[in-house]
Amino acid sequence: MDRPLEDKVAVVTGASRGIGRAIALELARRGASVVVNYRHNAEAAAEVVAAIEAAGGQGLAVQADVGDFEQAAGLIQAALNAFGHLDILVNNAGTTRDQLLMLMKEEDWDEVLRTNLKSVFNCCKAAARPMVRQRQGRIINITSISGIVGQGGQTNYAASKAGIIGFTKSLAKELGPRNITVNAVAPGFIPTDLTAAMPEEWKQRVIEMTPLRRMGRPEEVAYAVAFLASDEAAFITGEILTVDGGLVMQG
């Protein structure tokens, strides 16, 4: 099996479930040693590590609330302590607290921005210095098409994901001279725990709006992330790759 990420070390935040889990498994399948970050679910994170090791890879579960500056720094340090270097950072941790703006509580705004956007700042700031020292690295941030086109009832979520897009483009300019690429992947409708509570009629409407007429799979997002982490993507930076079946074209 081709292992283009052999000898690379990756940190994936929010990797115990959903898209993060798929990313961690795919990077490991391609040869990377993967630090599986989780906030609460130690059992699920351990299952991801077990799957990585069962396939012959190296995995390490590390608990950290990456919305907290010190804990995010601790996560990056744990990766360096365990493997000696860091090559790939995937900022995937995220949450939703959907509500119309007029009914949205301040704490729902704050928690979504803290988890989705501040975590990206926290982890990138901690990872940038070791990547600059080694003069190479890949940073991939998971945004959303909601950050591109907006979505009613998601002012907090859309704002956090739009912020990631601006952050990605700005950091790409800063770190490019040090041979570090910074890109983002914007998934469309992917069934995960975060989308499970959505009404079925809403899901069906989204599918009908999607040119490929289906939902995506977490693995399809993971393939895009793995490409951006690879040497084949060495001349790509500051880009937002939509993995959405064409949904964003519909506005």
Image (tube, rainbow, N blue to C red):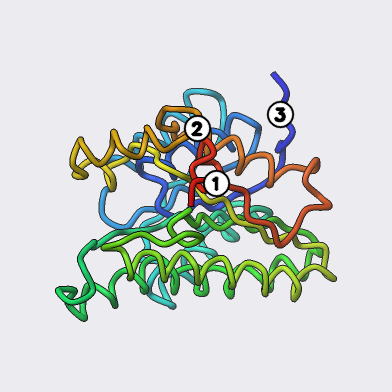
Badge nearest the viewer, 3 or 2: 2
Q: How many marks?
A: 3
Looking at this view, is 115 or 27 the one in front? 115
Residue shown at the point (45%, 36%) measured from the top left: 210
Looking at this view, is 106 or 89 the one in front? 106
Residue identified by numbered label 1 = 249
User: Would residue 177 appear left or right of 105 to someone viewing this image?
Assistant: right
Report how far apart the C-alphas of labels 3 and 2 lie in the structure: 33 Å
Q: Do the residues under discs 3 and 1 have CB atoms within 8 angstroms?
A: no
Report how far apart the C-alphas of labels 1 and 2 lie in the structure: 9 Å
Mark 1 or mark 3, which is nearer the start of the sequence? 3
Q: Position of residue 183 (x, y in %)?
A: 66, 57
Image quadrant containing the N terminus: top right
The part of the image, by quadrant, that contains residue 13 is bottom left
- Residue 211: give its label: 2
Looking at this view, is 71 or 21 the one in front? 21
Query: The residue under label 2 is which amino acid type?
Result: Pro
Badge nearest the viewer, 3 or 1: 1
Picture layout, residue 203 above or below residue 183: above
Residue identified by numbered label 3 = 3
Q: Do the residues under discs 1 and 2 have CB atoms within 8 angstroms?
A: yes
Q: Position of residue 100 (x, y in %)?
A: 21, 68
Q: Do the residues under discs 3 and 2 have CB atoms within 8 angstroms?
A: no
Q: Is disc 1 placed on a helix, strand or loop?
A: helix
Query: The residue under label 1 is which amino acid type?
Result: Met
